[in-house]
């Protein structure tokens, strides 16, 4: 077989790039120059210019694919357009790899010492799946550097140095963990950093910007950098400032160390973006609805109240200490996600606990959040076929899937079920030690070494087990494997019981249930008839149906639209009242639904009344839950 020399050489280069063991770990010759023009925010277009030092011969340029924190190949390559590569003023032809769409192959001519690369990144205009989110609005821009660069493949990320710069609209201010080298008008040039550090250091900017010192007088600075749609959204009360400062001190008390030289919470407040977060070592990219400081329900809905805490905990768990299979040397090397129940599950647990210790949640709100989390897992018949472990391993196919049939398909349940798992661990340690030890002791031992250092230290399942045994002797390997591999449909609620509480379904919605329905514009009747309305711009639109519920048995499906309930036009209140009325009678609840262009009446035979998750105290048992969320000194 005859193979063109360029193609053969390029494919060999790509093969080397894809093998973690063969990536070059010596400094890349020369510093890359990256210029990002982010001034065209109205059209959401980022214009990129790069200067890449090269040597003549075959070369593969790579677009970051496996982004830390997303745990799967999410680099939005489809949004990269207008790629032109030149050397010494002459265009150089490039070809995309036939298998790996993220790789561009070219042949650098003799005499060319640097490539001039230009392209545009077109931000999505509607919120998409994780890793492909909106990057700009009229008033806000979020520069995630992995979206706006190409790099020479075949090298470990920390061996490639880049000098980044960004041009912002006039008058806009920004926050980032990057350190400024100089400024020229609306362009800021940052100090050169390694490629992995650059990707780990996003920038947020906006018309309306505020910076809050969360560690006044401390040797290690921590700031909250806020950009918002409106200036009014930046207003924080003294109490809100205090609780966010308490988050920093409570995290320090829990872990006994810091693994950064400075830290920036990057907080975007906008109704144009979905609430989400992404962890970084010395910062975090947090996106919450505009009313986070002005509407208490925004902070309660959709786990918004513990988002900052969750991403902050990742500085210890996920950044400083990281599962070995999720620690890759460059962005072309695949990740393996078998320990996400530690990386994300433990972080989710500590995020909620620290939010309560800091005062971001009061005790009632924390219990309501925990009850809502537990109820979602209690309504997971899919556990009978997909164990918790597989929700982590299968993250590449589960992260970003539709919410329809979620109870049977399951999704990224290593987050919420991880909370229940680690509560089980925490309360077991407390019970077996007679209250002398807790998961805090594990956290200080496992994450607290090398204060002030941030070189990554990896861990394995055996490392986690050994650290737990050092805190409290137990067969932790069997304990964890039973919970990870179980196909028992029943939710793992042992930690709640051992904490002195039980999950109950009552006729009154909790503060979290009410906040979710208000802010997310849902009508969540999952625990009763078994459906959830995700209205959006279609009143009555059914977002999901609980597998084997009364609604499921009657033939209701996601995608249908409830037009009327018992011959009265649909409203969430009307459906709630009909569920309550059906408890005292024998007539089914009649739903007039639209399915495409067809209309039909579906009778839901349900008579158990309203059901909303709440935690109820179990008399005569130790209240370990209150001890867990008590602030540390």
Image (tube, helix red, strand yellow):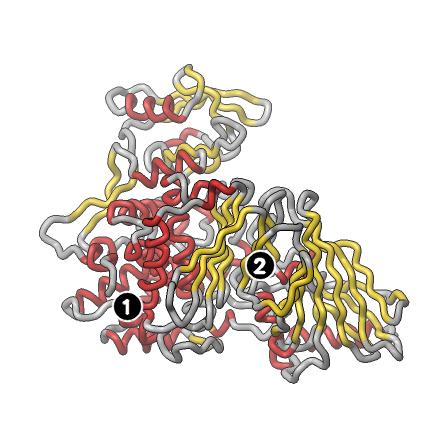
Compared across the picture, whether 593 is left or right of 50 comes to left
Query: Above or below — where is 481 with respect to 329?
Result: above
Position of 377 with respect to 231 (left or right) is left
The tag on residue 207 is none
Q: Give the structural element (helix, strand or loop) at label 2.
A: strand
Element type where label 1 sits in the image: helix
350 is higher (above) or lower (below) than 540: below
Which residue is found at the position 45% from the left and 37% from the top? Answer: 520
Sooner in the amino-acid sequence: mark 1 or mark 2:
2
Placement of the N terminus among the 4 image quadrants:
bottom right
Q: Residue 171 location in percent, x, y? A: 62, 50
How many numbered discs sit on the rendered protein? 2
Separation (CA) of disc 1 from disc 2: 32 Å
Which residue in the structure is indicated by mark 1? 440
Quadrant position of the C terminus in the picture: bottom left
Task: Give how far across and how far down residue 37 sits, in percent.
Answer: 71, 56
Q: Residue sitting at 35 percent across and 32 percent down?
A: 529
Residue 36 appears at what percent x and percent y? Answer: 70, 59
Q: Residue 154 sits in which quadrant?
A: bottom right
Q: Can residue 250 be seen in this view?
A: yes
For label 1, the crowd category at 10 Å Cα-Cα, with few meaning under 14, some 14 to 19 and many 20 or more, is some
Residue 334 found in image quarter: bottom right
Residue 203, numbered circle: 2
**Residue 631, position as x, y percentages in the image:** 25, 59
Of the two numbered discs 1 and 2 in the rendering, the one whose residue sits closer to the viewer? 2
- Residue in the foreground of this view, choosing between 401 and 177: 177
Does residue 1 show up? no
- Rendered image quadrant of residue 189: bottom right
Left or right: 19 as drawn, with respect to 308: right
Question: Which residue in the rendered view is the most extreme toward the left?
Answer: 620
- Nearest the viewer among 214 and 453 is 214
């Amino acid at each position: 077989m005859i193979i063109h020399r360029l193609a053969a050489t390029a494919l060999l280069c790509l093969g080397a790039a894809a093998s973690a063991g063969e990536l070059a770990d010596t400094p890349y010759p020369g510093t890359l120059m990256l210029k990002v023009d982010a001034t065209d925010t109205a059209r959401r277009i980022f214009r990129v210019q790069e200067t890449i030092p090269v040597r003549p011969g075959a070369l593969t340029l790579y677009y970051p694919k496996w982004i830390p924190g997303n745990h799967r190949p999410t680099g939005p390559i489809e949004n990269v357009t207008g790629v032109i590569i030149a050397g010494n003023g002459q265009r150089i032809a490039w070809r995309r790899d036939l298998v790996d769409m993220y790789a561009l192959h070219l042949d650098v001519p003799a005499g060319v010492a640097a490539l001039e690369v230009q392209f545009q990144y077109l931000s999505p205009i509607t919120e998409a799946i994780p890793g492909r989110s909106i990057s700009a609005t009229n008033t806000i821009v979020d520069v995630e550097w992995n979206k706006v660069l190409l790099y020479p493949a075949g090298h470990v990320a920390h061996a490639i140095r880049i000098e980044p710069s960004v041009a912002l609209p006039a008058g806009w201010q920004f926050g980032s963990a990057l350190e400024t080298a100089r400024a020229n008008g609306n362009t800021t040039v940052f100090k050169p950093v390694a490629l992995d550090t650059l990707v780990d250091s996003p920038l947020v900017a906006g018309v309306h910007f505020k910076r809050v010192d969360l560690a006044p007088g401390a040797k290690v600075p921590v700031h909250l950098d806020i950009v918002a749609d409106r200036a009014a959204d930046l207003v924080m009360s003294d109490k809100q400032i205090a609780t966010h400062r308490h988050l920093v001190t409570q995290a320090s008390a829990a872990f006994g160390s810091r693994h950064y030289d400075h830290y920036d919470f990057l907080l975007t407040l906008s109704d144009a973006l979905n609430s989400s977060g992404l962890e970084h070592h010395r910062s975090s990219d947090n996106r919450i609805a505009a009313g986070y400081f002005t509407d208490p329900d925004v902070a309660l809905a959709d786990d918004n109240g513990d988002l900052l805490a969750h991403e902050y905990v990742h500085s210890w768990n996920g950044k400083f200490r990281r599962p070995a299979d999720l620690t890759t040397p460059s962005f072309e090397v695949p990740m393996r996600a078998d320990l996400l129940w530690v990386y994300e599950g433990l972080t989710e647990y500590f995020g909620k606990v620290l939010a309560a210790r800091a005062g971001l949640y009061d005790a009632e709100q924390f219990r309501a959040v925990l009850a809502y989390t537990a109820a979602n897992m209690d309504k997971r018949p899919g556990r009978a076929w997909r164990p918790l472990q597989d929700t982590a391993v299968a993250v590449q196919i589960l992260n970003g899937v539709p919410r329809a049939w979620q109870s049977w398909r399951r999704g990224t349940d290593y987050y919420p079920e991880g909370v229940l798992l680690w509560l089980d661990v925490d309360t077991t340690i407390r019970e077996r030690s007679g209250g002398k030890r807790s998961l805090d002791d594990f956290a200080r031992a496992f994450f607290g070494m090398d204060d002030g250092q941030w070189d990554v230290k990896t861990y394995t399942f055996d490392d986690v087990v050994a650290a737990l045994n050092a805190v409290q002797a137990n067969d932790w390997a069997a304990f964890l494997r039973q919970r990870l591999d179980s196909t028992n449909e029943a939710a793992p609620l042992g930690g709640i019981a051992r904490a002195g509480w039980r999950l109950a379904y009552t006729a009154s919605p909790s503060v979290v249930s009410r906040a979710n329905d208000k802010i997310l514009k849902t009508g969540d009747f999952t625990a009763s008839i078994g459906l959830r309305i995700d209205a959006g711009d279609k009143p009555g639109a059914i977002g999901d149906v609980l597998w084997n519920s009364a609604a499921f048995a009657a033939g209701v499906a996601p995608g249908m639209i409830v037009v009327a309930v018992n011959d009265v036009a649909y409203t969430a209140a009307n459906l709630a009242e009909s569920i309550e009325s059906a408890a005292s009678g024998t007539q089914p609840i009649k739903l007039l639904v639209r399915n495409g262009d067809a209309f039909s009446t579906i009778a839901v035979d349900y008579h158990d009344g309203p059901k909303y998750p709440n935690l109820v105290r179990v008399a005569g048992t130790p209240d370990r839950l209150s001890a867990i969320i008590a602030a540390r000194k």
